Image (cartoon, rainbow, N blue to C red):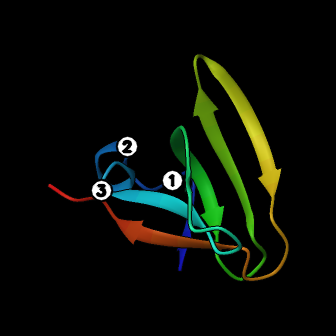
Amino acid sequence: MKLESWHSTEDKRRWKIVRTDDYTDVAGDIITADEATGECCIQVGGETKTLSFGPRGIRIVGRKR
């Protein structure tokens, strides 16, 4: 799965990023994310961070409601 910057904010809020090495959530609001490359760009406390966890290093999963 892949989320791009052009996806709506509301649509991206339905998802969260989980690391596949230790299955912990990656904190922050998703700007972009790509499961194939393991790269994501997130907004944390007003700061934009680009993270790379390697190929297949993240999963994009639905948030519980």
- Per the image, label 3 sits on a secondary structure element best described as loop
Disc marking residue 14: 3
Is 20 displayed left or right of 27 in the figure? right
Disc marking residue 42: none
For this orientation, the residue located farthest to the top is 46
Residue sitting at x 69%, y 47%: 41
- Per the image, label 2 sits on a secondary structure element best described as helix
- Per the image, label 1 sits on a secondary structure element best described as loop
Q: Residues within 10 Å of mark 1 (few under 14, many from 20)?
A: few
Amino acid of disc 2? Thr
Query: Which residue position is annotated with label 2?
Result: 9
Q: Residues within 10 Å of mark 2 (few under 14, many from 20)?
A: few
1 or 2: mark nearer the eye = 2
How far is the residue under mark 3 from the one under mark 2? 9 Å
Q: How many marks?
A: 3
Amino acid of disc 3? Arg
Place of residue 29 in the rendered image (x, y in percent of width and height, measured from the top left): 49, 39
Amino acid of disc 1? Trp
Query: Which residue position is annotated with label 1?
Result: 6
Residue sitting at x 49%, y 70%: 60
How far is the residue under mark 1 from the one under mark 2? 9 Å
Contact (Cβ within 8 Å) of mark 3 with mark 2: no
3 or 2: mark nearer the eye = 3
Above or below, comparing residue 57 to residue 43 in the picture? below
Contact (Cβ within 8 Å) of mark 1 with mark 2: no
How far is the residue under mark 3 from the one under mark 1? 15 Å
Residue sitting at x 64%, y 77%: 35
Is 26 displayed left or right of 36 in the figure? left
Q: Nearer the viewer, residue 21 or 17?
A: 21
For this orientation, the residue located farthest to the left is 65
- First in sequence: mark 3 vs mark 1: 1
